[in-house]
Image (cartoon, helix red, strand yellow):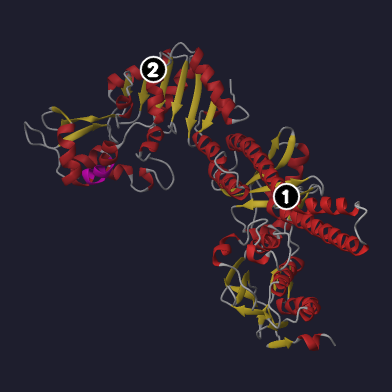
């Protein structure tokens, strides 16, 4: 029976049931069980021992006999790691299961003795042990403990106390046969068990890799827990990808949606062996999908891309709520080529699965371009398990963020609602004069306008933070936009007797961005610079060209911002206490500005000094195209009145 539960927790529960009801459970462990103890495995890409060394050159019987110095030089750091290693929770759990009678024996390919150190009694060591050394000349055997310290600390080679020849660690090297006694015991256990649990073994080395098959052939159940799929995953009752357990723990450790989604796509690419992975979230209102995170696209690129429900592979996955595996995406009629045209990133093979929780479609998780071969059924199964965890985590995080925002919003509503309640109460009082009534009505109007602005800003920020805002990018002249914003704010500047000036250097590059959103940022900052300025003060809007970016500076001669307030300036609903008597605001404008700028792959910074003024610096990625502009223009209040 092949079984893969819909989510990791269910798989674990089913595995527990199999162990609980078995009469003769046997464990087979490989190097993967000891990696959490600090001992590297052999075949993991980049970290495994055989990714750094050729095994036949360093770990063979021929090397030991002909080049013992080379063997011991390679073996010494590994011996240190094994000597210092301590049993991890997996070793301890197996020892406890044995103690309570749930498992009968442990067959291990490891030589680190961590099973014995954890308290396991019946351990069959197929690849030997680090506990003893044997002389290659007279075959005298000694305990390794007496020699290990001097070998690790000083590099002193162990020699036989009887004949002074080199002592060989009793581990099985390439070119040696397995110890017959241990091998016969292992086969007997495999053939007599009703459940075999494989932990941390890729099942690539014969003859040990054949033990689970012997168990299956005699009707035993099989559980596999490993970092990569094995050749027997399709026949296992339960297959638990160890990385999925780690990922499950990681996903539960954060409520930051961006961090969460980044972890998901990197995990998806890793466990499926793909070049890249991405998440497209589904917007039911517009019936579109939009890129929320990707391993091969930055935020400013993916923000502007939407994928229709009709005429796309991702849309088909959402509509049909089924996974797809495609070997050649360009040959598939559902392939939506616009994404490739915009990003310049080629899609060859594709594996996509729906993200569903509580019968609600959240989006699509895609893995692109398998490194080797085609996406397999095992890849699809692993991604489905990850997808279930991801969908639940995404929905929980969204709900948490929404409740957090709503709580903040309700808190901010209290003050204006309280003012409105007081005003309406006073209007009902007969002794109020007409002048007093007019003033109260004016206050009601002001508070109503503030509530309207607060609600609009709140919705803008909620959409920005959730990623639902799609930037409509165009290539435009930043200089023209700066002058346009100056013209819009000129009347307000004249009313407050503020000098507004714009400086734009020659050859200012064009910008590839959402013009309306960048305009929103400029107007918000210009409005603040005028609002919190001094009479006869000035505001400068200036652009500078840097190597890979354009810096736009908005500088004023206003009252300044206290140093202790600067770290909090871009937080939602934050208001500078010293500014509250000057003008009212929503406390959301700067948060919105930061979200917009970061969404374009840029950043925003601020410097300020009390009684001197404030400088906001906006950094945006630049293009190679340029547009000529005059150097600067100065608009005085009197001139603006004409």
Tell me if 379 is positioned left or right of 479 in this view. Answer: left
Decide: marks 1, 2 in contact (CB < 8 A)?
no
Residue under circle 2? 98
Secondary structure found at label 2: helix
In percent of width and height, residue 137 lies at: 12, 32
Q: Earlier in the sequence, mark 1 or mark 2?
A: 2
Q: Which mark is residue 409?
A: 1
**Secondary structure mostly taken by the magenta-highlighted segment of the chain:** helix
For label 1, the SS is: helix
Q: Position of residue 329 (x, y in %)?
A: 69, 49
Of circles 1 and 2, the one toward us is: 1
203 vs 641, left or right, is left
Tell me where the magenta segment starts and ends, as one range.
71-78
Is 126 or 411 nearer to us in this picture? Answer: 411
The quadrant of the image that shows the C terminus is bottom right
Question: Could you say which quadrant of the image residue 156 lies in?
Answer: top left
Q: Quadrant of residue 72?
A: top left
Residue 601: say if magenta. Answer: no
Residue 207 shows in this picture: no
Tell me what residue is drawn at x 57 percent, y 77 percent.
Answer: 546
Q: Is residue 600 left or right of residue 181?
A: right
Q: Residue at x 77, y 37 (%)?
A: 320
């Amino acid at each position: 029976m092949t079984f893969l539960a819909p989510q990791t927790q269910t798989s674990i529960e089913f595995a527990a049931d199999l162990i609980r009801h078995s009469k003769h459970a046997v464990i087979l462990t490989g190097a993967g069980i000891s990696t959490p103890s600090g001992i590297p495995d052999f075949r993991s890409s980049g970290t495994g021992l055989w990714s750094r060394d050729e095994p036949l050159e360093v770990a063979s019987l021929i090397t030991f006999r002909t080049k013992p110095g080379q063997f011991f030089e390679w073996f010494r750091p590994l011996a240190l790691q094994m000597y210092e290693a301590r049993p991890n929770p997996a070793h301890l759990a197996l020892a406890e299961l044995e103690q309570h009678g749930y498992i009968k024996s442990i067959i291990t390919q490891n030589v680190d003795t961590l099973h014995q150190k954890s308290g396991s009694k019946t351990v069959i060591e197929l690849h030997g042990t680090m506990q003893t050394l044997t002389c290659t000349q007279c075959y005298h055997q000694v305990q390794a403990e007496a020699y290990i310290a001097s070998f690790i600390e000083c590099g002193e080679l162990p020699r036989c106390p009887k004949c002074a020849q080199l002592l060989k660690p009793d581990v099985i090297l390439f070119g040696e046969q397995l110890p017959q006694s241990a091998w016969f015991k292992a086969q007997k256990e495999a053939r007599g068990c009703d459940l075999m649990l494989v932990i941390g073994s890729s099942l690539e080395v014969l003859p040990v890799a054949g033990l689970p098959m012997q168990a299956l052939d005699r009707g035993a159940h099989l559980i596999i827990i490993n970092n990569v799929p094995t050749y027997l995953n399709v026949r296992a009752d339960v297959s638990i990808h160890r990385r999925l357990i780690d990922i499950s723990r990681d996903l539960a450790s954060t409520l930051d949606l961006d961090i969460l989604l980044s972890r998901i796509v990197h995990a998806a690419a890793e466990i499926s062996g793909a070049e890249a992975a991405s998440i497209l979230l589904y917007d039911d209102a517009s019936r579109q999908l939009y890129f929320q995170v990707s391993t091969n696209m930055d935020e400013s690129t993916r923000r502007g891309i939407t994928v229709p429900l009709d005429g796309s592979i991702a849309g088909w996955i959402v509509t049909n709520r089924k996974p797809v595996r495609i070997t050649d995406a360009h040959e598939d009629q559902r392939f939506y080529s616009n994404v490739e045209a915009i990003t310049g990133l080629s899609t060859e093979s594709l594996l996509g699965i729906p993200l569903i929780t509580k019968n609600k479609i959240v989006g699509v998780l895609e893995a692109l371009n398998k490194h080797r071969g085609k996406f397999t059924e095992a890849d699809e199964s692993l991604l489905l398990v990850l997808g279930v965890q991801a969908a639940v985590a995404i929905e929980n995080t969204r709900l948490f963020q929404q409740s957090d925002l709503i709580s903040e919003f309700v808190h901010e509503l209290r003050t204006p609602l309280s003012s409105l309640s007081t005003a309406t109460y006073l209007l009902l009082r007969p002794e109020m004069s007409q002048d007093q009534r007019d003033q109260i009505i004016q206050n009601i109007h002001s508070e109503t306008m503030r509530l309207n602005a607060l609600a609009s800003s709140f919705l803008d920020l909620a959409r920005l933070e959730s990623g639902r805002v799609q930037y409509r990018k165009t290539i435009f002249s930043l200089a023209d936009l700066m002058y346009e914003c100056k013209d819009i704010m000129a009347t307000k500047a004249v009313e407050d007797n503020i000098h507004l000036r714009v400086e734009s250097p020659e050859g200012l590059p064009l910008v590839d961005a959402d013009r309306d959103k960048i305009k929103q940022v400029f107007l918000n900052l210009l409005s603040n610079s005028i609002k919190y300025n001094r009479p006869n003060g000035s505001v400068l809007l200036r652009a500078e060209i840097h190597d890979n970016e354009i810096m736009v500076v908005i500088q004023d001669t206003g009252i300044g911002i206290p140093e202790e307030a600067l770290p909090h300036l871009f937080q939602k609903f934050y208001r500078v206490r010293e500014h509250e008597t000057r003008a009212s605001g929503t406390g959301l404008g700067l948060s919105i500005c930061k979200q917009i700028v970061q969404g374009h792959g840029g950043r925003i910074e601020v410097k300020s000094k009390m009684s001197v003024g404030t400088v906001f610096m906006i950094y945006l990625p630049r293009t190679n195209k340029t547009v000529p502009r005059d150097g600067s223009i100065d608009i005085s209040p009197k001139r603006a009145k004409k």
